[in-house]
Amino acid sequence: AGLQTARGSCMARASNISVALNYVTSVPCAGEAACPPDGVFLYNTDVLFDNWGAVLAVYHKAHIFSTAQALDQAPPRAAVAEVPLADGGTLRVGLAVCFDAEFDDPTRMLLQRGVRHVLLSSYWGMASAAFSPRMFQQGYSRRWEVALVAANGADAFDAAVGGSGIYVRGDVLATIADAPGDGLVVADVPVELLAAEASAPLLAGAERVRRGSAQAVVRRPPLERGVGLTYRRTAAVTPCSVQDGPGVISGSCALMSLADGEEEGDSPRTLSAAASHDGVECAGKVELSVSGGISSAGNAHSSPFVYVLAALSGVRRYPDTPDGLDARACAIVRCAATFDPTTGGECTLAAADAAAPYSLAAASISA
């Protein structure tokens, strides 16, 4: 860690810019509770340097992900620094690492300290469309009403990792897609970013009050790698569980069927469904252009897919990850036509077939 800190300091000084780096640091802990036998904590750490190479802030990750056998988890805290600007002023920024972004703290702690600009380092994979890095980065910026600079790792080791961006209150200023190497994202970010009134409940630890309907529209088939759905029993709306990568979350699912007033011969056709679970209310639609027929139950006679709407709420658990994630979501899952929701069982996902007599025009979810 000492060598990496020295390199980071020299990098910042040589380029005359402030630099934030992520690496593992060791912290002596003799006499502290839960101190390992070797007498040091190993932390996933962000270090922020000013343009002279001085260390402005050090932050240890408070919510480690899949690394409990190798790294230690620090208590949440606000790592805040005043970064010098070219005009002689300063900008107050806060630090967070990867999985931290899915929890209230440390972000809420940062906002309570007056931070409106957050630097997020991550190595975030694309297990599913529901948690793709750039979509989550944008959502984080919108939820907390902050400017976010998110640097996500990308290399040839794992092609499913990547996607970085710069966002202001949910507006996308610049992003870079997945690449097996380094990339550069540049944008002009406003320095003055005052707290909006809607931030008050978040600062107090209260849940944001939903106003109206939030809608997400997908214009292409969602990424399916690592997603699975299992029906426990059958009904119009039935208990189910969804596996997203290593995480599992419970909910209620409904088979999507033809919308009212539509006939099987219509094209494009709209499948719809509604489902609710533990206070999560979901309504979904899928538009299909199909040359074959679709039954009133939603099964395409000549299509390899059926569509299921899931309302999800619960704690998602991951291996070697101390903190479970309290998650609520609406999702549309595409299953192979061999999946029979009348008998239950596991949905087997199928890749898109270019020769199939259908195309997915759009999908939308309202929560």
Image (cartoon, rainbow, N blue to C red):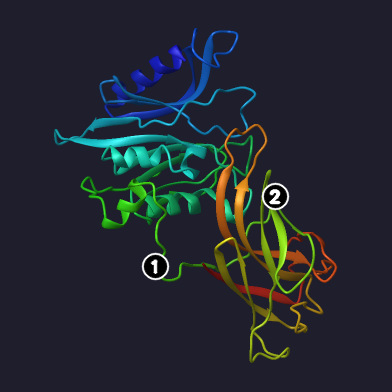
Lower position in the chain sequence, tag 2 or tag 1: 1
Q: Which of 232 and 82 is in front in this view?
A: 232
Q: Nearer the viewer, residue 142 or 213?
A: 213
Q: Which amino acid does label 2 sit on?
A: Gly
The answer to whether residue 19 is left or right of residue 38 is left
Circle 2 or circle 1, nearest the eye: 1
Residue at horizontal 48%, vertical 38%?
A: 100
Identify the image quadrant of residue 323.
top right
Residue at horizontal 65%, vertical 24%?
A: 69
Q: Give coordinates of residue 353: x percent, y percent.
A: 75, 66
Query: Dot 1 corresponds to which residue?
Result: 211
The answer to whether residue 113 is left or right of residue 333 is left
**Cβ atoms under marks 2 and 1 closer than 8 Å:** no
Q: How crowded is mark 1: few (under 14 residues within 10 Å), some or many (20 or more)?
A: few
Q: Give coordinates of residue 4: x percent, y percent.
A: 44, 17
The answer to whether residue 170 is left or right of residue 318 is left
Q: Nearer the viewer, residue 33 or 122?
A: 33
Q: Nearer the viewer, residue 86 or 216?
A: 216
Q: Give coordinates of residue 249: x percent, y percent.
A: 65, 51
The answer to whether residue 220 is left or right of residue 333 is left
Residue at horizontal 40%, vertical 53%?
A: 143
Let me know if residue 183 appears in the view.
Answer: no
15 up-or-down from 143: above or below: above
**Measured Cα–Cα span from mark 2 to mark 1:** 32 Å
Check disc 1 and report its element: helix, strand or loop.
loop
Q: Which amino acid does label 1 sit on?
A: Arg
Query: Dot 2 corresponds to which residue?
Result: 226
Count of numbered tags:
2
Identify the image quadrant of residue 331.
bottom right
